[in-house]
Amino acid sequence: MGEIARIVGLGLALTVVMLFLRRQYPEIAFELSMAYVLVVFLLLLGPLGQLVDLFRELGRRAELSGYYLDVVLRAVAVAYLATFGAQLSKDAGEGSIAALIELAGKVLILVLAIPLFTALLETLLRLLPR
């Protein structure tokens, strides 16, 4: 609970500061925004590691292939990174770059999912009568 309070408190304080800085020093405002993203990411590394460990343990108990779970975790990571990158680009006034980052994230997630789609299709084909 303390981590979210720190993240929200720092985020709100930074938002107020950036309201004033953005008008006179837009380059500093962007750098502060990037620094905040880095700080939050570092704060979340521990909890993210716990989530990954939990999903791996649940997958092991359910006797799921670790490969498929890794694909899902990678897809989630790509989605988050693409969202962060796109938002930072939007904040810097680069909407076109943000759109390309979002597109790249979607394409990469689909590419990561190809083995899952293939396995699902093969399973369905085996179940269908011939």
Image (tube, rainbow, N blue to C red):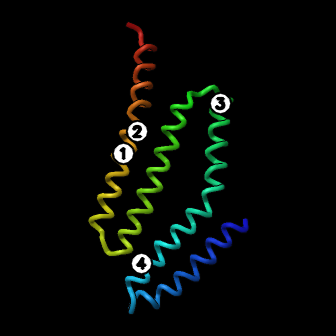
The residue carrying mark 3 is 60
Mark 2 / mark 4, whichever is N-terminal: 4
Q: Are marks 3 and 4 in contact (CB under 8 Å)?
A: no
Residue 30: which disc? 4
Q: CA distance from mark 3 to mark 4?
A: 43 Å
Furthest residue in direction right, as rendered: 1
Mark 3 / mark 4, whichever is N-terminal: 4
Q: Are marks 1 and 2 in contact (CB under 8 Å)?
A: yes
Against 115, residue 73 (above or below) is below
Q: CA distance from mark 3 to mark 2?
A: 21 Å
User: Residue flagged by tag 2: what amino acid is it?
Assistant: Leu
The residue carrying mark 1 is 108
Instruction: Residue 21: give x, y in percent of width and height.
Output: 44, 89
Q: CA distance from mark 3 to mark 1?
A: 26 Å
User: Residue flagged by tag 1: what amino acid is it?
Assistant: Leu
Mark 3 / mark 2, whichever is N-terminal: 3
Against 54, residue 114 (above or below) is above
Residue 112: which disc? 2
Instruction: Residue 105: give x, y in percent of width and height.
Output: 37, 51
